Image (spheres, rainbow, N blue to C red):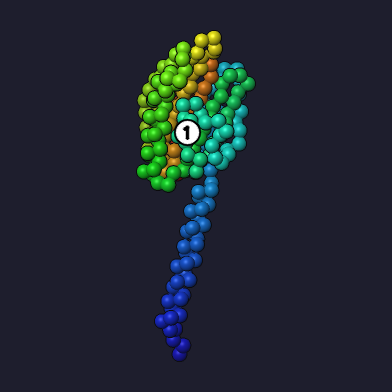
């Protein structure tokens, strides 16, 4: 009768464990390399005179940071998609896979504080300008989302209005920024709240 030695048994167990670890590492790496789910052009607030055109989902941050969010979005784990119309209205979505749900919650809080302070920060660096902002409240989707509006204007220039939707699902955070000429009275808040809800629902945490 053949009897397996203790050394052989230990070696076999080690090989099985190593193989399992490799499979787990490969699965984790594949998940990290996969982009979160993104909005489509049809998910954005309808434009009265133009369809929305969606760029490719691209790894990393956009060339120009979304207004109000300069310097706070991490490049690591980020993906983005830029949207445009035939007129002055545009949008961008940036999603970030964080190391953990706690890290994602911290990032979402940082983004919210940055947007809430944006109008005041902009005024400090823009002599002669005017700015205002509005907190439109939270949305009950996944781990939550928050919608804000920011209006800025300088003399002899067209005013600009921006809407921001910041939300989280597990360890993934997304921010959608929409903008066009106008003020807060021109912002499609109800439609943008639907856009933000869809953006969070589409994430793959």
- For the point 44% across and 44% down, the residue is 98
Image: 185 above or below 11: above
Q: What number of labels is visible?
A: 1
Image: 32 above or below 107: below
Residue 113 on image: x %, y %: 38, 29
Q: Is residue 80 left or right of residue 110?
A: right
- For the point 45% across and 34% down, the residue is 72
Asked whether residue 182 appears in the rendered view, the answer is: no
Instruction: Using the image as rendered, state which of residue 158 and residue 156 is in the foreground.
Output: 156
Residue that sits furthest to the bottom in the current view: 1
Image: 3 above or below 111: below
Instruction: Using the image as rendered, state which of residue 198 and residue 57 is in the foreground.
Output: 57
- For the point 50% across and 62% down, the residue is 22
| Quadrant in which the C terminus appears | top left
Q: Which quadrant of the figure has residue 148?
A: top left
Residue 129 on image: x %, y %: 46, 14
Residue 6 on image: x %, y %: 41, 81
Asked whether residue 179 appears in the rendered view, the answer is: yes
Q: Is residue 43 left or right of residue 138?
A: right
Give the residue number, with chain letter if any, for mark 1.
71
Residue that sits furthest to the right in the current view: 86
Q: In this view, does 48 lie to the left or right of 184?
A: right
Could you tell me which secondary element the residue under label 1 belongs to?
loop
Q: Is residue 38 left or right of residue 55?
A: left
| Quadrant in which the N terminus appears | bottom left
Neighbour tally class for label 1: few under 14, some 14-19, many 20 plus, Cα within 10 Å? few
Residue 147 on image: x %, y %: 41, 26
- For the point 37% across and 34% down, the residue is 109
């Amino acid at each position: 009768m053949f009897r397996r030695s203790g050394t052989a048994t230990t070696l076999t167990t080690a090989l099985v464990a190593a193989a399992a670890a490799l499979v787990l590492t490969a699965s984790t790496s594949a998940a990290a390399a996969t982009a979160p789910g993104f909005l489509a052009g049809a998910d954005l607030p309808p434009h009265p005179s133009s369809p929305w055109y969606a760029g490719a989902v691209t790894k990393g941050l956009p060339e120009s940071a979304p207004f109000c969010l300069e310097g706070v979005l991490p490049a690591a784990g980020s993906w983005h998609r830029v949207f445009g119309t035939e007129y002055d209205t545009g949008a961008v979505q940036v999603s970030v896979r964080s190391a953990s749900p706690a890290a994602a919650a911290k990032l979402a809080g940082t983004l919210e504080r940055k947007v809430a302070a944006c109008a005041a920060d902009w005024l400090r660096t823009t002599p002669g300008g005017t700015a205002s902002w509005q907190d439109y409240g939270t949305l009950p989707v996944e781990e939550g989302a928050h919608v804000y509006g920011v209006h800025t204007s300088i003399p002899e220039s067209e005013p600009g209005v921006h809407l921001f939707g910041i939300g989280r699902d597990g360890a993934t955070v997304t921010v959608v920024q929409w903008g066009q000429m106008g003020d807060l009275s021109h912002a499609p808040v109800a439609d943008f709240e639907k856009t933000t809800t869809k953006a969070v629902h589409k994430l793959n945490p």
